[in-house]
Image (cartoon, rainbow, N blue to C red):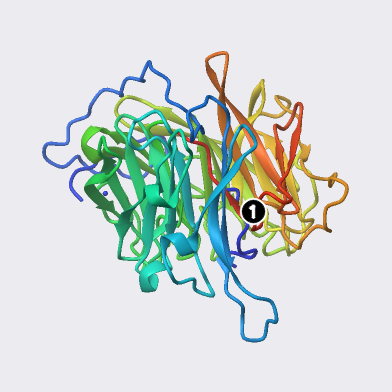
Amino acid sequence: MLGSRCAGTALLITAMAFVAAPTAGAEPRHPPEPGMLPTAAPERPTRPSRINDIDGDGKLDVVFVDPGEVAKPDDDQLGYGGSVQVLFGDGKLQQVTTSQLHDRLFEDSLFGSGLVVGDLNRDGYADVVVSDPSASEYAGRVWALWGSAAGISASRTTVLATGGGVGGSLAFIPLPEPVLAVGSSSEAGYVDLYRVRDDGHLGQRRRITIGSAGIVGRAFSDTAFGSAMSASGDLLVIGAPDAGARWTAGAVYVLQLQPGLRYWATRVLQGSRGVPGRPEDFDGFGQAVSILDDRVAIGVPSEQLGVNETAGAIQLLRVERTGHGLRIHPRSLLTQASAGVPGDVGETHILGETVLVTRLCAQGYGVISADYGSNHLLAVPFAPGSCSSGWLDTDQPAGLEPRKSCPPPVGVVRRFVDGAVADEPVIVIGERTLVLGWPGSLTVTDLSGRTTAGVRRLAPPAA
């Protein structure tokens, strides 16, 4: 049981390659190609970059997107265009609409399938990158909305890439050199790694797919390689939910980027490297992925528990950089039968269709996901007892419309606290309210009257 069950809801590379160093129980190592010598781990920059600050005023900005929709023949409601919207730290709201970017909105619009924030042109203002694989007769497009002291504007927008069904997913990897990863919406699946030039435009490209150097596995005709991606620092996580030891069992690839679009790569499967479980048809391992620092969460939304075929699960793991590859340290496989995980196992709970790794509390990391059986979001710490687990959105603010049939989107915004990066989950309730900062003090922002469309997808944190 693969594919999106709740459209619009989300949290949110051909030359040389390095291969990860083997660990106990690892797959056979492929020898490096000629000229592929290991390099030392990249040095971390000492100058902090601006994070989630579109207008450079030092305040936190939140970016979200509505894909829009076209009225169906049997629908008496008018369709509407989508938009990228920025809620600035001072309360003002700006948007760039799909009609300003391209002149056609399809009924099955995929606008906003990819959405990332990062300072591509290194001018001190965070930029918004958004994609639509359904644009240009499904050739796909990727746009950059350049940040500035005046915010974003349709007049400051550039098409970065088009063609080949590009834009199924996006990720921005800032280290050791800025790289934009662009996933394809094609069935076979591929990811293009682009070096980002100083002006923010895309330069040298390297395409990777299953069968590329270091990207091991069976190249099924439909792998969905790159349908989900997430990045943090120099690490890129790529989901391939239709790949793996069995078709539709799923696989995940973790890459450590090196200068010149080179990389170390390792594959994660259920049943390998100490990862619990075993590959089964339609598990969808990797349908959702998220990484923060070296913590990774992998969604397995169709994991079967007993007679419950889509109970779902979340695999946690930690990535270790060895200097000559990557080593995977599996953690728990979380289900709603696990101790400390809210809810209960059910046929249509499909836990893990959305995952988000964040600093759940000052003491540790956690993962936020949706329980579609109860239409709520839940939070679970990586280490038991380090943070509290529980439901995040059980109390609906007064005056909002009744809850829709799907959990709200969830994302993360980043800010600096005493010189260190701090993450705050952003939860959307009723498509009109943002709740920032959980746990701890909550800031509830009412968007009524300030946005013309509902919030459907939140940008992940700027790297």
Residue drawn at (35%, 55%), measured in percent from left and top?
Answer: 217
Camera-side residue of 288 and 417? 417
Disc 1 designates what residue? 455
Camera-side residue of 426 and 72? 72
- The amino acid on which the numbered mark 1 sits, given as a three-letter code, is Val
Camera-side residue of 19 and 56? 56
Tell me if I can see residue 209 in this picture. Answer: no
Query: Where residue 301 sits in the image (x, y, percent)?
Result: 62, 57
Residue drawn at (32%, 20%), measured in percent from left and top?
Answer: 43
Residue 441: name its quadrant.
top right
Going by the picture, which residue comes out furthest to the right?
Answer: 398
Q: In which quarter of the image is the C terminus?
A: top left
Image: 147 above or below 59: below
For this view, does 3 lie left or right of residue 381? Answer: left
- Crowding around mark 1 (Cα neighbors within 10 Å: few <14, some 14 to 19, many 20+) is many
Residue drawn at (68%, 81%), measured in percent from left and top?
Answer: 75
Query: Where residue 72 sits in the image (x, y, percent)?
Result: 61, 81
